[in-house]
Image (spheres, coloured by chain):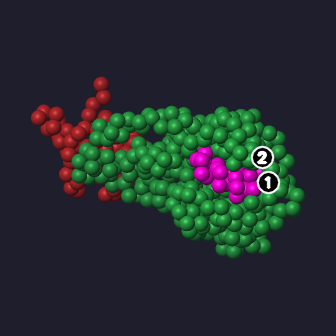
Amino acid sequence: MTTLRDALLDLIAAEALIDRAKLAPSATLADLGLDSVGVVSIVFAVEDKYGVEIPEDAFNDAPDLDGFLGRIEAIIQTREAA
Amino acid sequence: MTRDTRRIVVTGVGAVSALGHGVAANWTAAREGRGAIAPHDFDPGPNGPAAHTTPAALIAGDLVGPLEAALGRKIGASLDPFALLALAPAHEALAQAGLIGHPDLEHRTALVLGHGFAGIHTLEASYERFYGQKAARLHPLTVPKVMVSAPVSAVAMEFKIRGPVFAVSSACASSAHAIAQGAGFIASGACDIAVVGGSEAIATPGCLRGWEGLGAITASTCRPFSAGRDGMAIGEGGAIMVLEALDHAQARGATIRAEYGGAGLSSDAFHWTQPSLDGPVSAMRAALAATALAPDATVLISAHGTGTPLNDKNEAAAIRAVFGDRAKDHPVIATKSAHGHVIGAAAALQGVIGLMALTERIAPPILGWQGADPECDLNLVLNPGQPIAAEALLLNAFAFGGLNTALVFRRWG
């Protein structure tokens, strides 16, 4: 079964046109070439797919991809639990 | 506009439409009389009125996957369909011309594309999200996907074209103006190469309702110059030509497909939707004069031929006014009956198909024919098409708002 983390990595790879194999947990958003438009594009795709609302500034200080995904997962799981 | 002393030739062509992906597929379908206009359901979704069936010519198959394979990189959802419909034929045309990666694309090349609309699929989806779903935020790429210059920027970035790059718009004549403008850059000596053409993707539920409101859309299919014709069918597509100075093309050993003769451009300054006789006549005369054909030359006429009652009657009268007693010496084709009216891309797509006809010496048939209309008495090429001995192609594109263009290309060799 595909985990939420896998699904999010697939979504990021498709939305930000990044090779899935390069999405290492320790990579920073800058390492991945994600500028503000790239980040908002991902946020937008997550909102569309999971029906959640994510503040635009939720990721400004995310240390790395792992942290970034952790925050998205928390928002999705909070909504699913509600 | 008259062509200056510098001769201009076509060294590459590309096309994608409902007839197929690539010039070969488009030409084969047109030549064999396999049209692509069919009824389609257009559903505006839960916030709009009920789904509505409209005849249209839509792209079949995936655009992104083959383009990503051809370009060797990911595109994803970063471009509206109208930009994809420019990028794909631009790649085909530049590859055919042997210009991909060529250093002259950097500084001696112009890129001018025509579009009657812009990123309508993206715009309509955004509005549905905003007004329909009440979503507060729109996708961050909405503006770059919608803007009318998105296709030229996408093509310029892809192929590193760094000369004059911009979009032009004149409704159904847009890509003819783009071709004339690009040729002007070569004629003036400012550039050696001009990548020209256009693209259009407007088959959305909202946009088609706009066209239907105008009363311009057929209830069945596009039947140019035929008795019982009742309107046009919208198509989606894009087409590109690589124009090049003859001396430049010969110096690098390029294969020459046709010679650009000249353009005639005029405006009716009269009415939004009613055509005038004088405007199309003066455009055709100017294009023919710029090309200086022999008086007895046979010309293949690719008519604007939308299939609306008014356009076809007026265009037939204009052709008769231009050619007089010899009007019926010149075969007339109307390929919108096969690929639909691709609006801003129409002249470029009809140009690419017309150049194939000129080269192969075969005129593709007008489809949807139901019988003669005495007011459209021309040498119409009907099913199954016919061999031709034309020395030149006269390509008409007349736009709502009274903007007229005619282009002439000479057969090469």
What residue did someone put label 1 on? B327
User: A35 or A28: nearer the eye?
Assistant: A35
- Direction from residue B230 to residue A43 in the image, left or right: left
Does the CB distance between marks 2 and 1 fall below 8 Å?
Answer: yes
Residue A34 at what x, y percent from top left? Answer: 35, 54
Residue B178 at what x, y percent from top left? Answer: 60, 62
**What's the residue at 55%, 66% (across, down)?**
B270
Residues rendered magenta in the picture: B300-320
Calculate the distance from the C-alpha at mark 2 to the C-alpha at mark 1. 8 Å
Amino acid at pointer 2: Asn
Residue A63 at what x, y percent from top left? Answer: 24, 52
- Direction from residue B188 to residue B62 in the image, left or right: left
**Residue B58 seen in this snapshot:** no
What residue did someone put label 2 on? B379
Q: Colour of chain A?
A: red
Quadrant location of the N terminus of chain B? bottom right
| Labels 2 and 1: the sequence-earlier one | 1
Q: Is residue A25 magenta?
A: no
**What's the residue at 74%, 60% (across, down)?**
B321
Amino acid at pointer 1: Ala
**What's the residue at 70%, 55% (across, down)?**
B317
- Chain displayed in green: B
Residue B210 numbered mark, or none: none
Number of callouts: 2
Tag 2, which chain?
A: B
